[in-house]
Amino acid sequence: MDTLIVYYSRTGTTRTLAKALAAALQGDIAEIECMKYRPGDLRYFLAGYHSVAGKLPDIAVPPFPRSHYDLVLVGTPVWTSHPALPVRSFLTQGGLPSLERVGFFLTHDGHGSLSRAVDEMAALVDVPVAETLSLTGAEVKSETLAQSVASFAETLNAREYA
């Protein structure tokens, strides 16, 4: 299965999860870059404010190694119950390559509406969502990360052949 993992990470938590998924699924990986929301307290508050306002930033995404993928996983931190603005920019701009299935992975601090973030992302893609994984920052940094990733990968692989 040709898989692409594309993600945005402001602090590194979503990046850690993306790399674990890429290793488990033997997938290509691409990071959405956005200079506007780098780490720091002021930028954290700016990100939250812009998230509520829906103000989409400029982003950069490296070229994908292939033009078609069987599965694309899109990863994002959750900001004020929304997907991170750089991910919203990516999906709004039609950044996804040709694909058959899409899945999402989200990182969060344990509060806010994850279903709202997933619904918002799903509304921006043209294909059904195969599966979603959501982990807190603490879970990403814990010993349970490998098991969560393995279970998610197993579910995705099983659905490919269903």
Image: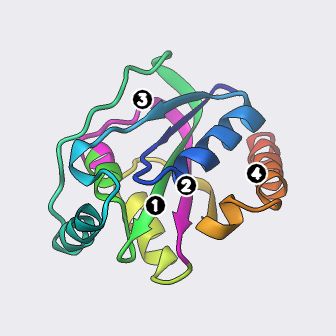
- Secondary structure category for the residue under label 4: helix
Q: Residues within 10 Å of mark 3 (few under 14, many from 20)?
A: some
Secondary structure category for the residue under label 2: helix
Residue range highlighted in magenta: 90-109
| Residue 107 is covered by the magenta coloring | yes
| Observer able to see residue 136 | no
Could you tell me residue 62's position as x and y percent? 37, 24
Distance CA(mark 4)–CA(mark 3): 23 Å
Q: Whole-Å distance between the Cαs marked 1 and 4?
A: 16 Å
Res 151 quadrant in image: bottom right
Q: Nearer the viewer, mark 1 or mark 3?
A: 1
Residue at the image position 60 percent from the left and 66 percent from the top: 137
- Is 137 part of what is drawn in magenta? no
Residue 51 placement, left or right of 82: left
In primary-sequence order, the first of circles 3 and 2 is: 2
Amino acid bearing label 4: Val
Question: Mark 4 — residue?
Answer: 149
Could you tell me how many numbered marks the image carries? 4
Instruction: Say whether residue 118 is left or right of residue 162.
Output: left
Q: How is the image coloured?
A: rainbow
In the rendered image, residue 126, in percent from the top left (x then y), is placed at 40, 47
* Circles 2, 1 touching at the beta carbon (< 8 Å): yes
Q: Which mark is residue 97?
A: 3
Please give left or right for residue 96 compared with residue 13 in the image: left
Tag 2 residue: 13
- Tell whether 101 sits left or right of 158: left
Q: Residue at x 33, y 47 (%)?
A: 91
Question: Hey, what amino acid is under mark 3?
Answer: Pro
Q: Disc number at residue 62?
A: none
Is tag 4's residue or tag 3's residue first in the polypeptide sequence?
A: 3
Q: Within 10 Å of the Cα at label 2, are there few (<14), some (14-19), or many (20+) other Cα atoms?
A: many
Q: Nearer the viewer, mark 4 or mark 3?
A: 4
